[in-house]
Image (cartoon, helix red, strand yellow):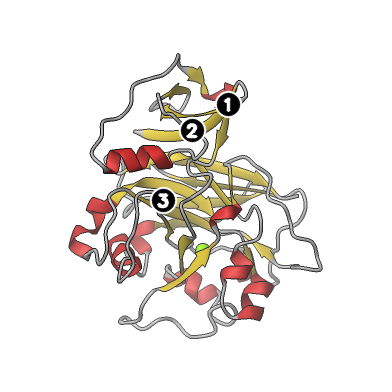
Amino acid sequence: MRIASWSWGGRYQVGTISADGREATPLALADASLGALPLIQMLARGEPLPGASGARLAVEAIELRAPLPKPLRTIFCVGRNYRAHAAELAESVFRTSLPAEDAWPIVFGKLAECVIGPHDPVRLPGAAVSTQIDYESELAVVIGRGGRDISRARAMDHVFGYTVVNDVSARDVQVRHQQWDLGKSFDTFCPMGPWITTADEMDGRSTRVRGWVNGELRQDGHTRDMIFDLPTLIETCSRGITLHPGDVIATGTPSGVGMGFKPPKWLGPGDVVKIEIDGIGAIENRFE
Ligand code: MG
């Protein structure tokens, strides 16, 4: 099942998207302003999927929003989770050499307020704030059933589904403050969508992640190449912290980000970044 959030006819709706990605069916939900969040909470409580509340719409006729336009709280983000990406940034953002096999994942937060839709513009913050804006194509895990101290062995039982995010990053700000949260959380810096594909339809542990800038393929990775796999990430993020239905974990980006080029290829006004993950779909955002 694909769960999407959209606006149509001046109001918000949440519903399902057909397998071919062309038709949207709204579901009977009291409040669609928070996107799929109330639906995920309902399903986590064991309630049934609500019925359709209207006729099918052409996806072309609706305006897709982020499936979780206002996540419950800060998004969990994982840094340095593909070896080739760790290598390309080893001398800058990460500052240390490649992780030892027994190292722990890097986890930081991205403010929930920076989420935007799959086709919304990303606002560049201006040269006084940052001159090193970069993209990161990422698979995001959406938590279904909540829990604390979730074991690796049970972790996949807590996955509701998957969506695509661009973990947009201001590299100079990231480095300057040592903690990454500021440079990752500028307004509009988390494009998300186009919808959530539920875990019964795909396995996020084995899918292809690609990113293009102005049509040029820059990132082409596979989630099986993660340093810390999805169960490990869920176990890590839930150690001593209760995960809730609708929580989001962005799982890190493959190699090919702008900072990895010599010289680096920063994003500027007019650039368009497209990210596609097999089994989900694509988001495409213009930088302004
Ligand atoms: Mg990232």
Q: Nearer the N terminus, badge 3 or badge 1?
A: 1
Check contact, mark 3 vs mark 1: CB within 8 A: no
Q: Nearer the N terminus, badge 3 or badge 2?
A: 2
Find the distance from the CA under tag 3 to the CA under tag 2. Answer: 31 Å
Check contact, mark 3 vs mark 2: CB within 8 A: no
Question: Which quadrant would the N terminus be assigned to in this image?
Answer: top left
Residue sitting at x 32%, y 60%: 230
Report helix, strand or loop for mark 3. Answer: strand
Q: Which residue is mark 1?
A: 11
Residue sitting at x 70%, y 63%: 266
Q: Nearer the viewer, mark 3 or mark 1?
A: 1
The residue type indicated by label 1 comes to: Arg
Q: Which mark is residue 208?
A: 3
Residue sitting at x 54%, y 73%: 88
Report helix, strand or loop for mark 2. Answer: loop
Check contact, mark 2 vs mark 1: CB within 8 A: yes
- Residue 169 x %, y %: 62, 64
Residue sitting at x 48%, y 44%: 68
Residue lying farthest to the top in this orientation: 55
